Image (spheres, grey):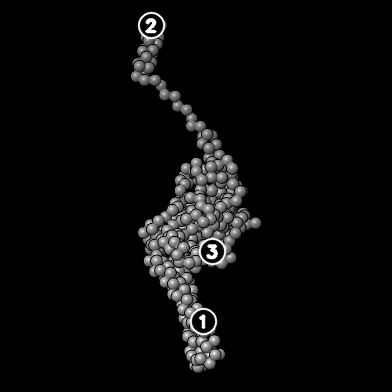
Amino acid sequence: MNENENNYQKEAIKRLEEHAEEGPMLDIEQPKHWLTLICIFGLLVVLILWSFFGRIPTEATGRSVSISSSGIFTIESPSTGTVTELYVTEGERVMEGTPLAKFYNPKLHPLISSIEATKFKIERLNNQSLLLYKALSINVSLYKQGLIPKMIIDQSRSSVMQKNIEIENAKSTLSGIFSELEENSFTGRKEFSHYKKLLHAPSDIIDFPEIQDALSILKAPSNGRILEVLANQGEILKPTETLFWMEHPQKIGETEVFYGTLNSETRGQIRPGLKVLIEPVTVNPREYGAIIGKIKSIYPYPVSKEELIQSIGNKQIVGYLLQNETIMTQITATPDLNPHTKSGYKWTSGTGPPFEIPTGTVCKMRVIVEEQPPISYLIPLWKIRPQ
């Protein structure tokens, strides 16, 4: 009996060893369902909190351009002429009276020559008139002595009057030439008056080529900075065509503003104080984000292309702002300031780009019309009303 039990035990041990050699036994555990439940519950809590406290923005998109708060202005060609020289470049600061460009107008030389010839004619007529006055005086004396008839005195007086008429006609012609010269010159009114006085001086002391050269130069009417040169050397310009786009010098503490245009359909949704995100085209928004600002004012009426050109002065930028539309809503936005950034503005990314945003930079613009919690799209009672 004991021998059989020993054999049975040995056989059992042998089978266990064979099973151990074939592979380890598998431990089967019950799944931990509570971990899954916790994850699902956490996601639901986050979703509920987001639906109440999160915000989904409604945006109105448009375009804008940075403009100096001191104001901008354009310099137009006062006459028809070919640009022969450009003395300034974009970004350059100039003072009042700084030469900006030189023109060639083929009418200047003939007009100055006509002035010289007309002055000579007037001088000659004055000399002739003086002689006629002397002759008249002599004839009056002879008539009193009874040496000549009265008819000769009448003829002398008629000659004097005729000569005076010729002198007045010549002076009128000279005045007309000066008016035409002013229309064809490129100087300001005050400077032209100076050269007009010089041309009235005796001809033998006038340097006509020097005056012609001076009348061909366009000078800065005031201090400022060149934003853009809108003409090229060799280009023919007509009167009122824009040559330079400039800004007035900024005063201490002044910053840029942004003129923006939005679709006229969004006019009823926007109001002063709304948040604005401005993305200059020179900045990568994925890397630096956007300038944070707010609407300062809204133009009371829809603006047309002509009105934008009058306020901005640059047709190319106006074309960009209009976006192929004829009527837009114009707004003025002010950026939030941050003295710790290179640009001086507050950015969504923190520090923004490592360079300034100059006047004339075109930008994309997003106006945050409203921000609503997600739950309001399911339950309108939770909608936040604008203040």
**For the residue marked with disc 3, what is the amino acid?**
Lys
Q: Are marks 2 and 3 in contact (CB under 8 Å)?
A: no
Q: Position of residue 282 (x, y in %)?
A: 45, 48
Q: Secondary structure at mark 3?
A: helix
Which residue position is annotated with label 1? 133
Quadrant in which the N terminus appears: top left
Residue at the (50%, 41%) spot, across then down: 354
Against 274, is 31 above or below?
Answer: above
Q: Position of residue 362 (x, y in %)?
A: 48, 54
Q: Secondary structure at mark 1?
A: helix
Q: Position of residue 98 (x, y in %)?
A: 50, 54
Quadrant in which the C terminus appears: bottom right
- Mark drawn on residue 123: none
**For the residue marked with disc 2, what is the amino acid?**
Glu
Q: Residues within 10 Å of mark 3 (few under 14, many from 20)?
A: few
Which residue position is annotated with label 2? 3
Q: CA distance from mark 2 to mark 1?
A: 176 Å
Q: Are marks 2 and 1 in contact (CB under 8 Å)?
A: no
Instruction: Tell me where residue 237 sits by quadrant.
Output: bottom left
Between discs 2 and 1, the one toward the N terminus: 2
Residue at the (53%, 84%) spot, across then down: 137
Q: Nearer the viewer, residue 251 or 46?
A: 251
Q: Position of residue 320 (x, y in %)?
A: 45, 59
- Mark drawn on residue 190: 3
Q: CA distance from mark 1 to mark 3?
A: 39 Å
Against 292, is 318 above or below?
Answer: below
Q: CA distance from mark 2 to mark 3?
A: 139 Å
Residue at the (36%, 59%) spot, across then down: 234
Between discs 1 and 3, the one toward the N terminus: 1
* Residue 250 seen: yes
